[in-house]
Each structure stands twice: as structure tokens, then as C-alpha cells.
Image (cartoon, rainbow, N blue to C red):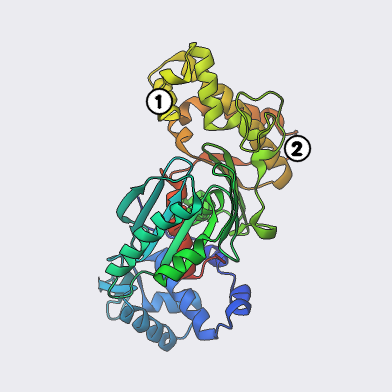
């Protein structure tokens, strides 16, 4: 699920907000230098000590000391000699990916997935957990699985747990303020996992987590962008906003609730808030399914349980009713995206979710609507499909790795 890191422009290091990091936890200059070195290794591996010293302007002795510390902690490894530039051939180093480093918990309205991953985000093991309508029972199931993982971690290699969930999250306390699909309020999921396992837990809204995953694992034209928005199409519509290489969460994590902006009247399904005029009511997976059932003259009982995936498959197979349903959904998706572009002027907008499997079908309608909606003279944005097949799952992993690498306040 992870491609080798690309050689990125030094500006990619802007994601480390050193001023905020230092103010937040009394970091020393040595701590900050360590983050610089670790991130240069991640972004440019394989790399030599001499090259790190050159690009970071740190002293060779400082770099060597930090590299030895990172090796001792099992975070990096030497992989042999590189090409000589006139003297002795330099020893190259890279991240040491072996072993579990992060636990990701991806809670969605239909199921919960718990994974372990290594330092570069490769999923090592995964387990699906059946959802419960009760938050206490749901927490018990998640805590039980994570406790089992922690018990097997005899070397203390697991850095923490990341939780992605479809609702409003107070990232400062790790509490789910409100999850519309389940109607859960004030769920102290981070506290419950931490007290049971002793592991540090980071919790965020699924769209914010997906945005962080795009920063971490996305295609270079997205991850290297200073400002972009991810629009996550699922049971609802979620948006994650990245400003200056940082996920923007707003007051108490409430930023990005664009799924509730008004885009029309009488949407084919109800939004999670109960209204039929929200963007979510027109552009979600449920809206596409409702359109398909109407076009094909079918009832919901005549479509398999994974109904949106089935609509996509039928569209890819050439069924006109499915194609028309996805094309109309893309039109309304484009209306909402054009509003985001006019209001926030990002460099790129990334569309994530299962709908991207039908990108050749939806892209023309999406682009046409956006170009027609944005007034002449105003800048547009690149519209791209996410390359992440499971953006919220990778987001839950990213919550841990971003803290490990000091790339974000999570």
C-alpha cells in the first residue's frame, strides 16, 4: 500500500511546525534536530550522513550522533555503500520498516477495521470488528483487540494507536463529540484505550485523517501541495482541509463540515442531519444508490448489501442506469467542490472513496460542472482522484506516524 518515498523539494519540510512543537512540549534544539534528521531520511532515503548534514546545515558530528541514536532505537538501518564522489564511499541509511509500529482503528458506519503497520505504513495484519449500536460495547470490542496487540509487543515497538471515526472529534481530549450515524455523543474513546493499554491514542474525524494520509502517502502533486482539500465520498460527505501543509481542524475540530451546506432542494436521500437539501443528500453514496434504483425501476431489496459497490460495478460493466446515476451524483459533487474552490482557493481537490473506481465515468461531469461554476478570472484547482484505496484506514495509521515523526499536531 506504500510506494517508495519520492525525492521531494526541501519545502516539504514545512510540515514540521517547529515553533508550535517547541512551545507545546518544551522541546530542546536537539529534539528538533532529531526530527529534521528523521524526516530527511524518510523523504529522501536512501541517504548518507554527509548529505543530511549538507541539506540540513547541521554539523557532521551532530548528524552522526542523531543517526546512531535512531539506529539504536531501531528506527533506521544501514544498507550498504553509495556511489563515491571522490573520497570514501558513503554509507547509506533508510527507515527500518520491520515490525509493528502503529495500530490503526478505522471506525465506519458499516464496520470497524483494526490494523498494525510498520514505520512506512505497510499493513502487517488486519482484523474486521463487527460494529455495535452501543458505544460501551463498541469500545469494549476495540479495547479488547488493541489490548491483545499491546500484550504481544514485548519490545515496546508500538508507538501508539490512531482512531479514525465518522463524526465530530475534539482532538485535544480524544473524545468523539458527536457521531451522527450512531447518534453517539461525548464518547471518550481515547481515554478508554489508553487506560486499558498504556498506549498513546490519537483520534480524529475520518476526513481529517484521510487528509493526513494524503500528506503522508499521497501522490507527490498532492502531498507536496501547500493547500489542498480532500472530499471523502462515503455514507456521507466529509472534507479535510490542509493549509500550509497542516490539517486545519478549526475550533474543537469542527472545521470542514461542508457536507451540510445547502446545494439544492429535495435530495434523493436524507442527510445524516435529517434534511434533504444538504450536499450530503445529493452527492453521497446513498444518493447515487437511490438514483440507480429509480433509474432501473428496482427496490432496495433487489440490490446486494454492498449496494454502492454494486452500482459502481454495474456502471463499469456498461449498464446505462448505473452510469446515469453516477454521472448525476458527480454533477452535484462538482457543485459542492466548486463552492470550496471559490471560497478557499486550494491548489488541489482530492476526491476519495469507492467512487474513485468509477473515475473515468464521473470525471467529465465533475470537471464540466466545476469549470462552469467558477467565475471567469478566478483560479481553479487540480481535481484528482485519491491513490489511496482505503483513505480513512491509512488515515488512522497516519495519526500515529505523524506524531512519531513530529509532522503534525495530532
Q: Which residue is under mark 2?
A: 377
Q: Position of residue 103 (x, y in %)?
A: 38, 61
Q: Provide the residue designation for mark 1.
A: 310
- The reply to whether residue 380 is visible in this rendering is no
Q: Is residue 160 above or below residue 368?
A: below
User: Taking 339 as reference, is 311 left or right?
Assistant: left
> Distance from label 2 to label 1 (Cα)?
40 Å
Q: Nearer the viewer, residue 9 or 345?
A: 345
Q: Residue at x 58, y 75 (%)?
A: 21
Marks 2 and 1, the one that precedes in the sequence: 1
| Depicted 383 relative to depicted 50: above or below | above
Q: Considering depth in this image, is 286 or 230 the residue closer to the camera?
A: 286
Q: Nearer the viewer, residue 38 or 7?
A: 38
Quadrant in the picture for the C terminus: bottom right
Please state the horizontal and vertical placement of residue 181, each as a whole percent of the image. 55, 41
The residue positioned 31% from the left and 81% from the top of the image is 72
Q: Position of residue 346 (x, y in %)?
A: 65, 47
User: Who's the residue at 54% across and 85% down the image?
Assistant: 29
Amino acid at each position: 500500500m506504500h510506494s517508495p518515498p519520492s525525492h521531494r523539494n526541501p519545502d516539504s519540510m514545512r510540515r514540521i511546525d517547529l515553533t508550535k512543537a517547541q512551545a507545546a512540549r518544551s522541546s530542546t534544539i536537539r529534539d528538533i534536530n532529531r526530527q529534521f534528521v528523521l524526516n530527511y531520511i524518510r523523504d529522501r532515503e536512501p541517504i548518507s550522513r554527509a548529505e543530511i548534514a549538507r541539506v540540513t546545515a547541521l554539523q557532521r558530528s551532530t548528524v552522526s550522533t542523531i543517526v546512531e541514536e535512531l539506529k539504536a532505537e531501531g528506527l533506521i538501518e544501514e544498507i550498504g555503500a553509495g556511489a563515491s564522489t571522490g573520497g570514501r564511499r558513503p554509507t547509506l541509511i533508510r527507515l527500518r520498516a520491520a515490525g509493528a509500529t502503529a495500530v490503526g482503528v478505522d471506525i465506519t458506519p458499516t464496520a470497524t477495521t483494526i490494523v498494525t503497520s510498520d514505520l512506512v505504513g505497510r499493513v502487517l495484519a488486519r482484523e474486521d470488528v463487527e460494529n455495535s449500536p452501543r458505544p460501551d460495547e463498541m469500545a469494549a470490542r476495540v479495547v479488547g483487540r488493541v489490548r491483545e496487540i499491546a500484550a504481544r509487543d514485548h519490545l515496546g515497538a508500538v508507538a501508539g494507536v490512531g482512531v479514525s471515526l465518522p463524526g465530530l472529534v475534539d482532538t485535544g481530549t480524544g473524545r468523539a463529540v458527536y457521531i451522527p450515524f450512531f447518534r453517539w455523543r461525548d464518547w471518550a474513546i481515547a481515554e478508554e484505550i489508553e487506560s486499558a493499554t498504556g498506549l498513546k491514542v490519537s483520534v480524529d474525524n475520518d476526513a481529517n485523517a484521510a487528509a493526513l494520509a494524503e500528506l503522508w502517502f499521497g501522490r507527490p502533486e498532492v502531498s507536496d501541495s501547500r493547500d489542498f482539500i480532500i472530499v471523502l465520498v462515503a455514507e456521507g460527505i466529509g472534507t479535510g482541509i490542509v493549509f500550509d501543509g497542516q490539517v486545519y481542524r478549526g475550533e474543537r475540530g469542527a472545521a470542514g463540515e461542508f457536507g451540510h451546506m445547502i446545494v439544492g432542494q429535495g435530495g434523493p436521500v436524507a442527510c445524516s442531519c435529517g434534511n434533504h437539501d444538504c450536499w450530503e443528500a445529493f452527492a453521497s453514496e446513498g444518493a447515487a444508490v437511490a438514483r440507480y434504483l429509480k433509474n432501473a425501476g428496482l427496490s432496495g431489496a433487489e440490490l446486494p448489501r454492498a449496494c454502492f459497490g454494486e452500482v459502481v460495478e454495474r456502471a463499469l460493466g456498461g449498464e446505462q442506469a448505473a452510469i446515469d446515476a453516477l454521472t448525476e451524483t458527480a454533477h452535484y459533487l462538482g457543485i459542492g467542490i466548486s463552492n470550496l474552490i471559490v471560497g478557499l482557493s486550494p491548489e488541489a481537490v482530492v476526491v476519495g472513496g469507492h467512487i474513485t473506481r468509477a473515475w473515468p465515468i464521473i470525471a467529465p461531469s465533475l470537471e464540466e460542472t466545476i469549470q462552469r461554476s467558477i467565475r471567469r478570472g478566478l483560479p481553479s484547482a487540480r481535481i484528482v482522484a485519491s491513490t489511496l484505496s482505503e483513505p480513512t484506514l491509512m488515515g488512522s495509521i497516519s495519526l500515529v506516524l505523524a506524531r512519531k515523526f513530529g509532522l503534525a499536531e495530532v
